[in-house]
Image: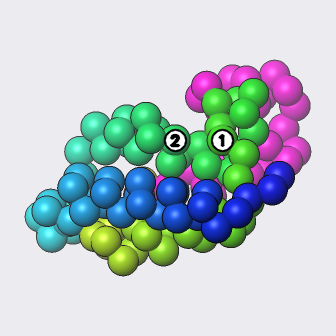
Amino acid sequence: MVEDDNDIETLSYLVTRFAAKEIAPHVTEWDQAGEFPRALYARAAQLGLLGLGYPEDLGGTPASQRMRNAMSLAMARHGASGGVFAGLFSHNIGLPPVLRHGSDDLQREIVPP
């Protein structure tokens, strides 16, 4: 996979707009409540953020660690608290072992398209 600085800039712009518009105005309230609306998952997925770095055949968007880091940095700089970020991307804890070691059947069962 070859990515250039334009890819990074485009992703950073997308994430910055998402975080500034849909997270930053609510982050204090969500952090105090200890939760955020489930609709935020759907919006992040719609933008391709939840699948970033995962196989296309399982609904992801192949991306390098550099791209994933750019996404994380833009989220942190423009409104996502640690709690919101950890909750929104919690699948990054359990999904990699399933992709690395799980059978094709298990992957199709667990990984949403």
Asked whether 78 falls inside the magenta stretch, the response is no
Above or below, comparing residue 73 to residue 18 in the picture: below
Q: Position of residue 31 (x, y in %)?
A: 21, 68
Considering depth in this image, is 59 or 10 the residue closer to the camera?
10
- Residue 44 falls left or right of residue 94: left
Give the color scheme: rainbow, by chain, secondary structure or one colour: rainbow
Could you tell me the amino acid type at mark 1?
Thr
Earlier sequence position, callout 2 versus callout 1 = 2
Q: Residue at x 15, y 70 (%)?
A: 28
Q: Position of residue 72 (x, y in %)?
A: 50, 68
Q: Quadrant of residue 7?
A: bottom right
Asked whether 102 falls inside the magenta stretch, the response is yes
Residue 48: numbered disc? 2
Circle 1: element type: loop
Could you tell me the amino acid type at mark 2?
Gly
Tell me if label 2 and label 1 are in contact, CB under 8 Å: yes
Question: Does residue 84 appear in this view?
Answer: no
Boundaries of the magenta span:
89-113
